[in-house]
Amino acid sequence: MTPSGERRVSAAALRIDLNSDVGESFGAWAMGSDEDLIPLVTSVNVACGAHAGDPVVMARTVQLARTHGAAIGAHPGYPDLAGFGRRDIVMDRDELEAWVLYQIGALAAFARADGAELRHVKPHGALYNRAAVDRDVAASIVRAVRRYSGELVFVGLAGSVMLDVAAGEGLRTAAEAFADRAYESDGTLRSRRLPDAVLPDPATAAEQAVAIVGEGRVRAHDGTLVSLHADTLCIHGDTPSAVDYARAVRDALESAGVDIRSVSR
Amino acid sequence: MTPSGERRVSAAALRIDLNSDVGESFGAWAMGSDEDLIPLVTSVNVACGAHAGDPVVMARTVQLARTHGAAIGAHPGYPDLAGFGRRDIVMDRDELEAWVLYQIGALAAFARADGAELRHVKPHGALYNRAAVDRDVAASIVRAVRRYSGELVFVGLAGSVMLDVAAGEGLRTAAEAFADRAYESDGTLRSRRLPDAVLPDPATAAEQAVAIVGEGRVRAHDGTLVSLHADTLCIHGDTPSAVDYARAVRDALESAGVDIRSVSR
Amino acid sequence: MTPSGERRVSAAALRIDLNSDVGESFGAWAMGSDEDLIPLVTSVNVACGAHAGDPVVMARTVQLARTHGAAIGAHPGYPDLAGFGRRDIVMDRDELEAWVLYQIGALAAFARADGAELRHVKPHGALYNRAAVDRDVAASIVRAVRRYSGELVFVGLAGSVMLDVAAGEGLRTAAEAFADRAYESDGTLRSRRLPDAVLPDPATAAEQAVAIVGEGRVRAHDGTLVSLHADTLCIHGDTPSAVDYARAVRDALESAGVDIRSVSR
Amino acid sequence: MTPSGERRVSAAALRIDLNSDVGESFGAWAMGSDEDLIPLVTSVNVACGAHAGDPVVMARTVQLARTHGAAIGAHPGYPDLAGFGRRDIVMDRDELEAWVLYQIGALAAFARADGAELRHVKPHGALYNRAAVDRDVAASIVRAVRRYSGELVFVGLAGSVMLDVAAGEGLRTAAEAFADRAYESDGTLRSRRLPDAVLPDPATAAEQAVAIVGEGRVRAHDGTLVSLHADTLCIHGDTPSAVDYARAVRDALESAGVDIRSVSR
């Protein structure tokens, strides 16, 4: 986790995208700090009304992303507002493909209406977790993305099945790692049900971000060093201190000379 | 457009679109006879998941339209499955615009995934009725349509406010009349709450269709003749005999030499 | 109602409940033949708005049950209208308990408003299938039922885990068998994905009903005889010929001298 | 509860209920400060899942009310999560009655499961505002309440149509006034769209509360004194400072010797 020399990594080669899940308010209910967070990231994954978000929120969020130059992506989830897309729902392949396509189209309309373009797709919550290990679920999502546009970047968990499937279908992929989450020694994320699943403070997250980007590895929870290639780092937006984490990560990466920009650019 | 002689109208000048509201099943619940009806019309208005339809139904319906060469349009409604979009919901302008844009985008994704294009938009139910008389509501819908694409045709009630608003914003419009519904002497549709709101049989509907297209007028419920210009005739799909009506209307128009084709072509 | 001949089972001891899942329409979408079916059964399981049904449908269905003297039960399902409660949703225990309690209360209000009482609860679809094999899921449902009222009868698959759990918690239980479905030699229902899952005609279903009630056994799909105790027979209402099946089953049972009445009486 | 000095109103005769709308979180989205607010009021109006709340939230909220001895009431609203029940939805009488009955039953189940009883019903948002002026809407709500139980107290805007209708149908009623909202000289609430609709600070709200309870009148926004009889004062829970307002109002009323207790006791 210790970078070399004057902390500066070889900037020429190093670049990273910072992404955040946004637009997760719903009706009268607010969630996240989109106004503060979006200016700090280079890509946003916008909820599409199935697990969170509604058309008004989507319009506002896309506009915010436009204003700050963040690449706009769809963040489809299981259709389950009450469960926030965090509950597994067993769906047929075609059914899941249709639900993902629906959400991509709905979000793309707001980008288009603002003269912007949809750039990427990243599944949400239980759908993300399932697609990381289940080839069929991953394939349904990938088919929806590809049928919408072969130009979209598929964002998924680094090293997971879904990136294989997406790449196999000819999509550009972006491997995602987490600046603010602890890793296990096998390279998986430490479960939120265990203690210390979230890194304790912005400085630690910043350090992890620089290690991932600069050295391609991360210090796992048990101390082992794990190799990890990431194209994009996720900054969670649903905690009160999300903005502090984002700023710390961004500052550290900039100080390390990393080129921070969207994967889809 | 003035007919003459033996009831045969001057075919060269006469054309009409036949449209139907389709894709109104939802989950396990079936509605309509889309398989039989879609081959008989030239344009379909596909429910977008707010008042009816779901992603699976939308995928299937769009594919059916593709197969039979019907122009694909969005049929946005108030977000109200339990009310089937037939209940007025008082929404802010921006809110309504966002909801319509959402639905257009969602449906367009299915067209796009099938290599087709969205051609037109026709509001549904309470939203249609409201937009026929309420300039603000019409304007919200029109803004959503235009922001999505200036190429889309706006389909609305012949002679109503919404067509004015749409035309004023530079959209192509298509005036809709009804083959199977009775008219009042002021040119409005006879309310479904009154007796004889629906024409009694396919033959009567066919006759009315030919009169509207060939002569630009319709015999109202009280016997008076009312002028009525229509670019498209709606064939309702939610009655058991919808297909009989559609076939009768289509046959009569063809016999009268009318060119039946989509307004968006 | 007086049977005869050798087919007559020992009437004194034999009784059975006939139940049907009803109230599964939603908004503008109709499902089932409740008007025809409810007069033929002794218990109805009314959808509660989560997987099907809505307040208007519930009010109408409860009233219909009242009119025909059928015992009124709640038919709670996973909250998933688009999936008709047929998709597994992974929920926490407390979450599931709360969702079931919610549905029981909602339905009970309609019974109460009509001067009737809720008598039983039978889970629906994926929830039923899950509770048949998953002790935790069964326990959540049972807790909801018991907390609402210890007087309610718990209706579940004959021989399944859920009846054990319910009985263990002190609830009266009713073991359900199916007149119109084929069984496997291990006593489970033949999957609907396999051929011949549904018995071919009303006469065969009637024969199976009499065998189950009269002899406590059923001829499985492969010809073996399987022991099966049932307190209630389910008559499916979602097929066009449901009423024919119901009538045939009822007639055959009456001819066999079986006392047909609600388990909760 | 210890009064003092000249501020003391004639305690013997004076009593008031303090109520708050609670349980308005939904799934992952939090709203309000129920934990802090519920201990300060004597009645709570719990959202029932139509405009806000879900079964998990309802279970938790009812338990909280039980713990603190607040009377539990249902707070039914239009079925419109995305609009938080603040949008008018035009419903038929029977439809509205069924929707209200549904919500009452659902909430009552949680009270019952906790060994408590439902005590009152207060409509929410657009439904409340509509019922204040529309006799038909009021009548639908009142019918639902009465069919559920003639023992329930109907809580509605002081001086409004809905209280007349409820009383006319034999229900006990409770007239509601607002401690934290400005009044107009005609006794109506100052619209939230106008400036100064909400009183500027807890002290002013407390003063207004004491004036309403002690003197039966309120100083309107333009300075005129308006007569106003209230049985219950609403403390809004959806602002950050709600708890401060509640505490100030409660303290002032106690200092004035007012007996603070639920209308349904």
Image (tube, coloured by chain):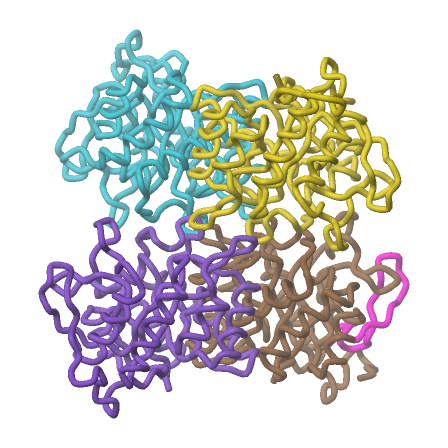
Chain colours: A purple, B brown, C cyan, D yellow
Q: Quadrant of residue A216?
A: bottom left
> Which residue sits at x=72%, y=16%?
D11
Q: Does the magenta stretch include residue B11?
A: no
- Do we see residue B82 in this rendering? no
In this picture, is D15 found above or below B36?
Answer: above
Q: Which residue lies furthest to the top in this view?
A: C12
> Which residue sits at x=32%, y=13%?
C4
- Report the front residue among B55 and C168: C168
Q: Residue furthest front?
A: D5
Q: Does the magenta stretch include residue B211?
A: yes
> Which residue sits at x=83%, y=83%?
B2
- Do we see residue D130 in this rendering? yes
Image quadrant occupied by the N terminus of chain D: top right
Which x, y percent locates residue D246?
60, 36
Image quadrant occupied by the C terminus of chain D: top right
> Which residue sits at x=52%, y=72%?
B105
Magenta-colored span: B210-230
* Relative side of A161 to B71, left or right: left
Q: Which residue lies furthest to the bottom in this view?
A: A12
Which x, y percent locates residue D260?
64, 22
Which x, y percent locates residue B58?
47, 65
In this picture, is A115 found above or below C167?
Answer: below
- Report the front residue among C238 and C159: C159
Q: In which quarter of the image is residue A123?
A: bottom left
In this picture, is A65 found above or below D211?
Answer: below
- Report the front residue among A82 and A31: A31
* Relative side of A209 to C3, left or right: left
Which x, y percent locates residue A133?
20, 62
* Relative side of A156 to B99, left or right: left
